[in-house]
Image (tube, grey):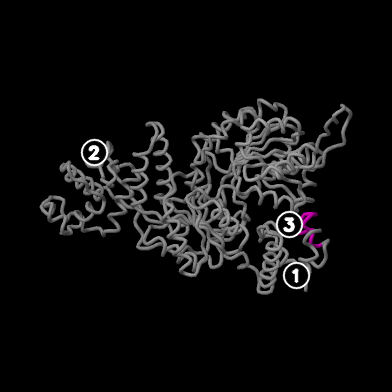
Amino acid sequence: MQVTREAPATAAADGSPAAPLRAPLAVLAEVFGYPTFRGEQAEIIDTVVGGGDALVLMPTGSGKSLCYQIPALVRPGTGVVVSPLIALMQDQVDALSALGVRAGFLNSTQDYPERRRVEQAFLAGELDLLYLAPERLRVPETLDLLDRGRIALFAIDEAHCVSQWGHDFRPDYLQLSLLHDRWPTVPRIALTATATEATHAEIAERLQLARARHFVASFDRPNIQYRIVGKDSPRTQLLGLLRSEHPGDAGIVYCLSRKSVEQTAAFLTANGIPALPYHAGLDRRVRSTNQARFLREDGLVMVATIAFGMGIDKPDVRFVAHLDLPKSVEGYYQETGRAGRDGLPSTAWLAYGLQDVVQQRRMIDTSEGDAAHRRRLGAHLDAMLALCETVECRRVQLLAYFGQTSEACGNCDTCLAPPESWDGTVPAQKLLSTVVRLDRERNQRYGAGHLVDVLLGKPTPRIEQLGHTSLSVFGIGTDLTEPEWRGVVRQMLAQGLLAVDADGYGTLRITPTSAEVLSGSRSVLLRREAPKAARARTPRTGRRGAVSPAADLDGAASLVFERLRTWRAATAKEQGVPAYVVFHDATLREIATRVPTTLEELGTVTGVGVSKQERYGPHLLEALLG
């Protein structure tokens, strides 16, 4: 659907008729440089422009921001955006300013004169968009300020933060129902890229959006290739991925602990890949500097805990890697969604092993909170394990978690190199029998390593000291290798056929369902362990694997593209803004292919709005044609 009609007129303050509002499609072309809307963007924008409320679930990179930015430019007054992303507000304002949009922000990082200037601009009607951190709405002065200005709309970004079912709950978001209570006639739009049906329902309830129009787009990100590999020296595996498939690319590597973040960043740097650490334990100035460098420089790798990433608007992140198992599918989807926002091929890579399962199970069992909280955490983990262990298309499994059906994608590891499944009932019975035998020694604790040694018949000093060579199960598992046995343990933990004791030692115990396996009334289907991660081949047309943004350009266009990137980097550095604020890679690719020779021709390129055409056009053409 495209909005081509004139938007409705609104009455002036004295009640006299006002001129018709600008058409959203015209704003899209003139300001943002795009000829048409995508998906449900037009209908969402039309709803908000007309004064209606909207709840929007759309994947990262699908243009959610346009759904409130364009109505803010069309409707009288200032669009007020509530966002938790204090560290990124300056970059968001810079990006809008480059488009000729009048934008500002209010948060705790500003001094009084800065805040005062923004407040005066808002009251004078000189701002199109005003970004606020949610905690600002606890300040009476902020509420009074909003009362005295003219508000076009309220946009609640990262709306999943209001939900305790979500993966990034923020208590400050609970107060946002006051927007409806205090300004009932101002339209509201809440947006998120990640929400299950339970999270969706909670957002609607807590933000009083049950009667709003709900828009749920497909969560599919077809340009992202999902791959999950067995963990075997994960940093070395990561290094191989970056060297072979992503040399010189920007990317994000997620680790569970601060120590692992720093060690991984140091490892990559020592091996010739520029990497920066980011976690909550670093000095705030160091975090801010590292984030700014990642956004502004090409080819940097950010190694981080999950404290980093929400709202990152860097479009050319070519890979997101996880060295530890995410705690939920929502978190995994949100984090991998930071790759390929420009629509170009990108990689989501995860190294996953037995210790991940043991560690996560133990963390849940020892977590603070009541039994319901632990059950919720367990349900999140079970869904993540199901995604890791599936023998079917990963994308089908991922989308099913969000309530959407799809067909095999041809662009994930299980599609490109289909794994085998096998009847693991007998090995499962052997493993459970070993757990039962060892569990009789109540004063001892035995983890997966000891169990596997007993099954393989390894006379280690500890096994001999404990007399376990005389157990009936000693040596009954020599038909499988040690990695295969560790895979059996991991998959049985994932299926709930084994449990991890909360003793802090990783002790394995049977579960209520273990008896069904031991009795033979339940069979166990397992995924066969690959000897090593297979290199993904290039999928069919339209589902390409991760490649350089210039890889499919011909020789001449590729050289032009790189020349334009050099010009862009110098321009961005001179202006102190991220490179993508100047132009996205996708726009430079189109310019390199079409080679416009005049400002008028340049203005027809996707992503070149009027403001950028005037601001950058002459210098870009000089770099292109000079």
Q: Which residue is drawn at 70% across and 26% down?
A: 184
Disc 3 to disc 1: CB gap under 8 Å: no
| Res. 498 in view | no
Tell me the tag on residue 465. Answer: none
> Mark 2: which amino acid?
Ala
- Sequence-first tag of 2 and 3: 2
Residue at the location (53% across, 41% down)?
A: 404
Q: Name the residue under label 3.
A: 606
Q: Residue 62: x percent and y percent?
A: 63, 48
Q: Is mark 1 on a helix, strand or loop?
A: helix
Distance from disc 1 to disc 2, alpha carbons, whole Å, reads: 71 Å
> Mark 1 — residue?
624
Q: Would you place residue 572 above or below residue 92 in this image?
A: below
What residue sits right under mark 2 in the picture? 515
Residue range of the region highlighted in magenta in the rendering: 601-613
Camera-nearest residue between 610 and 486? 610
- Which quadrant holds residue 214? top right
SS label for mark 2: helix
Classed neighbour count for the residue bearing mark 2: other residues with Cα under 10 Å, few (<14), some (14–19), many (≥20): some
Q: What residue type is labelled 3?
A: Thr
Quadrant for the C terminus in the image = bottom right
Label 3 SS: loop
Question: Is 286 covered by the magenta stretch?
Answer: no
Mark 1 or mark 3, which is nearer the start of the sequence?
3
**Rendering coords of residue 355 (x, y %):** 34, 52
Would you call the spot at circle 3 few (<14 residues within 10 Å), some (14-19), or many (20 or more)?
A: some
